[in-house]
Image (cartoon, coloured by chain):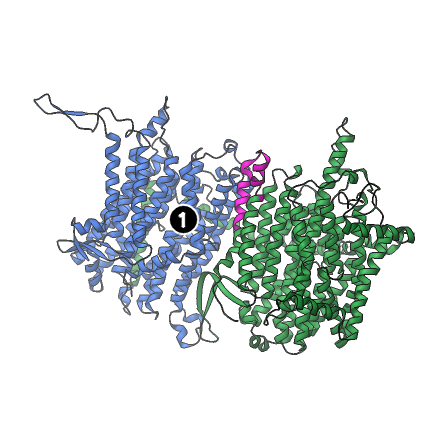
Amino acid sequence: MEVEVFSTEFWQAFAPEAILIVGLLLIFIIPNLGNSKFRIPLTKVQVPWFLGGRRFSITGSPAIPGMLATATLFTALGMMAIESVDGNMDTTTVTSNGLVILQLDNFSRFFEILFLAAVLLASMASLDRIPAHTFSGKKSLDELYDNRRQADFYILMLTTAVGMCTVALAQDLFVLFVGLELASLATYVLVGFHKESKAGAESGVKYFIVGSVASGIGLYGLSLLYLEFGSLQLATIAANWSDSTLLGTIALGLVLVGFGFKVSAAPFHFAAPDAYAGANSPVAGVLATASKAMGMIGLIRVLLVIALPEGGTDESAIWLYTIATLSVITMTWGNVAALGSTNPKRMLAYSSVAHAGYMLAALTAVGAWKWGEIEAPGDYAEAIVAAVLFHLFVLVAFKLGAFLVLGLLEMEGEVSRLSALSGLARRDPLIGTAMFIFMLALAGVPPLAGFMSKFLVIAGIVSTSIGELWMNGTVSFSDLHWVWWLALAMFINSAISVFYYLRIGVVMFLDIPEESRRKPLPYGASIRMAIWICLVATILLGLSGDTLIDMCYRAADSLNLA
Amino acid sequence: MSGSEIIDYAVLIPLLPFLAFPVILFLGRLFNGTPTWVKNVKEGGIIALVAMGASLILALSLIREHMNKVGAANVFTWFESSWWNPETGSITTKVFGFGVYIDHLTVMLLFVAAFLCFLINIFSIGYMNTDSINDNRNHRFYAEFVLFCSGMLGMVLADSFLWLFIFWELMGLCSYLLIGFYYERPSAAYAAKKAFLTTRVGDVFLVIGLVMLWNLFDGTLDYDVLFKAENIAAVDSGELQLALGMMFIGAVGKSAQFPLHVWLPDAMEGPTPVSALIHAATMVNAGLYLVARMFPFFSAAEMGALSTLAIAIAIIGGITAVMAALIAFVQMDLKKVLAYSTMSQLAYIFTGLGSALWLANNGYDDLAAFAMGASLFHLFNHAMAKGMLFMASGSVIHEMHHAHHEVAHHGHDDHHDDHHDDHFDAQSMENMGGLASRMPITATAMFVGSMSIIGIPLIGGFWSKEGIIASAWKVALKEPIFLLPAMLVLIGAGMTGFYMSRMWFMTFAGKPKTEVAEHVHEQTPWIPIPLVVLTFMTLGAIIFAGMHAGHWLGDFESGHYTSFVDGIGYEMEHVFLNHDPFLMILTYVAIGLSLVLGPSFAMALYGGSLDGNQKAKPWMQWAINLSAKLNKKSNFDNSAWANSSLANSLHKRLHFDDVYDAAMMKIVVGFAKLSAIFDTRVIDGVIKAIESTSQEASRRLRALTTGSARDYIMMTALGTLVIFMLLWGVA
C-alpha cells in the first residue's frame, strides 16, 4: 500500500510513531503549564494563556516527565507489539513527489520494537537512577538540579527513540541519515548528561567529536553516492549498483566508516568505551543495544540491499574481504581488550565491540552466499539475517540488563572499578543472581538467550559454508568456503570471552564488599522491575524463542534477499 | 511404541518443584524473626508443600491416564538442529528438548517418588521447624529438598538416558548438600564428602557406559530408539554387555551396593527427613530404576549373551544382602540399623532384577516377567515401609531430644549446662526402651514397617520378597552358579527377621533404659500424619498384591486383573499351596526363617515387658508379652557374642572403611600428589603463560585507547585507509 505523507492512511499506519511525537511535545508543554495571562495589546483584557507564569503544582511536579515518557513509550511499544507479534504486516510505503521515503514492513517494525523496548527499559530504570525529588521540604542544590533537568533527560530519550524509528523506516539514504543524526545528537548529550562530573562531560564531548568526524565521512560518502547515481533512493541505487564505477566503491568505503562507528567496529570503536564509562548506566545500555542496532540497519541496508553481490560476478563482491577482515579484527580486539579491563562498564563496552564483530561475520556469510561461490538455497541467507536480528534483540535482554544492574549500583556511588560489584550476591542475592545470569547469557551458556543467538549465527555461517556441497556426496575440509573460518574465529572468541564474564561472577559471589558498600542496596522499584523483565526475557527467549525467531524470519524475509 | 499422544503437562511434574527451588531459596531470608505461623511459610515448608502437592496431583492424573499403556512424547522442544551426515549422505535432525516416556515402571516409580516426597515434606514441617538448631537455615533445607524431588521426578519421567543422567547428577548434588546440612559438624561434612565421592566413582563408570551405548546406537540415547528389538539385535552383544555393565556400576554406587556401599550409613548425618528421602523416595531407587530400564536389552539381545552381567548383578545383590544384615546385627544407632536394612533390601531387589534379566536373556519370558514384577513390587513395598520407618525413627529421635531438654532443664536448672547435647545420644537405642506405650502411633508404624521389611506373611513386603527368593531359586535350578545368590537371599531373610525385630524390641519393649526415655511422649504436630497414612499403605499392600501388582509391573504389555477377591485367592494359593513342591518347601523355609527363627532370637535377647503401669496398644502388647516370656526362659549369655572377633569387626563395618581409607591414603593420595605436581607445574604453567600473554596483549590494546579525541580520529582515518586498501585489493 502506498500512502501520501500526512494522509489519513498515513496516520493510521504510523499511529505508534505519532504517539511518540505527541508524548515528546507533551513533555515540552506540561511542565510549563501555569497561570500566566496574555494581555491583548492596547486593551486591559487579559486572556489566560497557560504557558509560563506560576506553574501549577500538579503539572509542575518533577516526576511528571519521567512518567510521561515511560507511559508514551509503553503505549507505542504495546501498539506495535500487538500489531506484529503474531502476524505478517502489510507493507506500507510513504511516497512524496514520487520518491519513497519511509516503508513500514516486518523489518522496520521489528527494529522499532527493539528500539522502543530498549529505550523503555532505560527510561524505567532512569526513574530511579536520575530520581525526581518530589518530597516537600528543603532540597539540596543537587536535588534542585536533578529536578530541573528531568524534562531535558526524557525529551532526549524520546528524541533518540524517534530518530531510531526513522532509521528503521527510511527507504532513502538521506532520510536514514537524518534519523541517524537525530538519534546520535540526542545520545551525545545523554552521554554527557551529568555535566558536573568530569568523566561525564569529557566523554560526552569526545563521543560527539569522534562521532561527528565519522558522520562527516559517512555523509561525504552519501554525497558521492548521489553523484554517482543521481539519487539516494535505496531501490534506485540497488538497481544500478552493478553499473557503478570506482566512485561507487569509494562512496561505499566512506559510508562504511560512518556506520562502522555506530556499530563500534574496530578501529572506529575507540570512543565507545569512554562514552559508556562516562554515561550513566541506562544510557550506556541504550548505546550498547539500540544504538548498535541502528548502525546495523545502516549496514544491512547498504551491504545487503544496495551492494549485495550479484551472482557470479567478482566485481560486485567488493566488500566481502573488507567486512570479513573487520569482523575478525573487531571481535578479537573487543575480547582481548575486555580481558584486562577492570572497569565493568568499559568491560561491557569492549564486549559489545566483540558482539559487533560476530554480527559482521554473519553479514559476510550472507554476502558470500550471494557471491555465487556457494550454491545454497536462499533461506540460508535469510536464516543468517534472522540470526543477526535475533542476536540484536536478545542483547536488549541481557546486555541492557547488565547495564541496569550497574545502574542500580550507581545509585549508591560511582561504578568504575570491578570491586564495586564485590559481594553483590551476598548483599542482594536476587540481584547478584540476575547479574550472574546476564553474564552467563553474554558468554553464551545454554539454555539462556545468549546461547541461542550465538548458536543460530554460528550454525548459519557453517551451513552457508557447506552450502549444497553435501549434495555431491562427501565433503572434504578443503571444499568448505572460507567463511567457515569466521565461524571458527567466533567460536574461539566466545571461549576467550567466558573469562571476563565469569570474573564478574567470581567477584560478586566470593569477594567481600567494599567499605562504602556494606549497606543493603538502594531499593528502586522501577529499576528492579526493569531488571526482572530483562531476566525473564533472557531465560524465556533462550528456552523457547519460537515467537521471536518467527518474527526475525518475517523481518529478514521482507528484505527480499533471495 | 503404542501411541505417542501429547502429555504436555507431564513436564510440570518435575518443573514445579524445580521452580520452587529459587523461590524458597530467595524468599526464605526475607522473613527472619517472624512469629511461628509465618515462619512455616517463611522457611519455605508450605511453599514446598504446595509445589509437591501440585506435582503429586499431576502425577496421579498422569498415572490414571497411562495406567496401562506405553507412551512416549516430546513435551518440550528447545530447538531442532539438522545436519548432514557425511557417511550416509542423509540429513539428520536432532531435537533438543525434554520428552517423557511412560510405562508401568515409570508409573510405579512416579507414584512412589511423588507420594513419598509429599509425605516427607509434611513430616519435615513438623520435624525441622520445631528445632531451634534449624532456625534461619530451614529455607535452605526446603530449597534443596524440592530440588532433590525434582531430580527424582525428572529422572523417572525422562525419555532418554541422557536426561536420566542429568537428573541423576542433580540428585547427587542435592544429596551432598543435604547430607552436609549441618555443615558445622565435621562428621556431617565428612559424610557428605564421602557420599559424593563414592557415588562419583560409580558415576564415572555410568558415563563411560552411556558413551559406549551412544556409540553402539548411532548417536542417540532415546528410549524409543534404544528399546526397539531390531536395533538391539543389530548391535554387538559383547560390547552391549560391557556398556550395560559399566552402567550397572553406576547403579551400584547410587544404590549403595557392595563394594560402593560405604557412604550410606554415614549419610545418616543429615536430618532425618533427608534420610527418609534418600532411602525411600529418591536416591537409592535411582540405581534400581536404571537396572530395571535395562530389561528390554536383555530380552531382545542374543540368547544368553548377557547372562554374565545378570549373574554379576545377582551375586552383588546376594553378597550385599547378607553383609549388610550382618553389620546391622550390632548397630546401636537407630538410624544406622535402618540404613543397613536399606542396603540389604535393595540387595534383594538387585538379586531379583538379576534373576529377571537372566531369565529374560535366556528366553524364559513368563518367568522373567514374574521375577521383574516381584522385584519392582518389592521396590514399592520397601519404599513405603522404609519411608515410614525413617519417619518413625525421626519421630522417636525428635521426641527423645525434646524429652532430654526437659529433663536437662529440670535437673540442672542452677548451673546452666549448655553442653548437655554433647553427652547424650538421642539416636542410640541404648538410651531408649519401653517407648511402645509412650509413642503409640510411632510404635505402631515401626511395628508394621518392620513386619513388612521382614516379610511377615500377608503384610507388605512378604508378597514381593517371596517372589524374589522363588525367582532366584528358579534360576539356580537352571544355572548352578546362581545357587550362591539364591542361598544368600534365603539366609538373609532370617537375618532380616533378627535385626529388624532387635531394633523394634530394643526401642519399644522392655523398661526405659534412661530417665529421658521415661519422659518421651508424642507431641510434635504434622509428624503423625505421614506415619498413619503409610501404615495403612503398607497394610494395604495386600490389596495391590491381590490386584496382581507384580504381574502388572512385570509384564509391560498385558493388562491387570482388578477383581481383588479372585486375585487374592489366586495369590494365596500360588504362595502357600504351590503345585511345584520345591517352591512350596522353599516358601515355608523362608517363612520359617523370617517369621520364626529371626524374631525369636531377637526377642530372646532383647525382649522384655514394659513398666508395670504402662500398657501398649493391644496389637503390640502381645508381641511384648511374648518377648518377655522368651527372654526370661532363654537366659542367653550375650557377652560371648559381644566380645567375639566377628562382632568386633562388624562394629567396624567389616573393615571396609578402613581398607578404603588405607587404599585412599596410599594409592589415591599418592597419585593425587603426582597429579598436583603435574597440575601446578605444567598445566598451571601453560595457563599462567596464556593468561599473562593475553593480559599483556589486552594492556597494549587498551593502551591505544589513550583518552584523547585526536588519537581516536587518527585511528578512524587509519581505519578508513584500511577499508580503502581492502576494497582496492579486490577491485
| Residue at the left extreme, as displayed | A42
Secondary structure state at the residue bearing disc 1: helix
**Nearer the observer, A334 or B519:** B519
Mark 1 lies on residue: A397
Question: Along the horizontal axis of the image, is B6 left or right of A74?
Answer: right
Q: Looking at the image, which residue is at 76% across and 71% down?
A: B577
Percent position of residue B105, x then y: 60, 64
What main secondary structure does the magenta stretch of the protein show? helix
Determine the image quadrant of residue A41: top left
Percent position of residue A393, x then y: 37, 52
**Nearer the observer, B271 or A553:** B271
The answer, for residue A274, to whether it is visible in the render is no
Q: Quadrant of the C terminus of chain B?
A: bottom left
Residue B37, magenta (yes or no)? yes
**Chain letter for the blue colouring in the rendering:** A
| Mark 1 nearby-residue class (10 Å; few <14, some 14–19, many ≥20) | many
**Image vertical order of residue A290 relative to residue A125, above or below:** below
Of the chain colours in the picture, the one used for chain B is green
Q: Looking at the image, which residue is at 83% across and 43% down?
A: B511
The kind of residue tagged 1 is Ala
Q: Chain of mark 1?
A: A
**Nearer the observer, A39 or A203:** A39
Residue A286, magenta (yes or no)? no
Percent position of residue B712, x then y: 34, 44
Residue extent of the magenta highlight: B18-45
Percent position of residue A348, x then y: 42, 45
The answer, for residue A236, to whether it is visible in the render is yes
Query: Total of numbered circles in the picture?
Result: 1
**Nearer the observer, B480 or A242:** B480
**Image vertical order of residue A259 relative to residue A142, above or below:** below
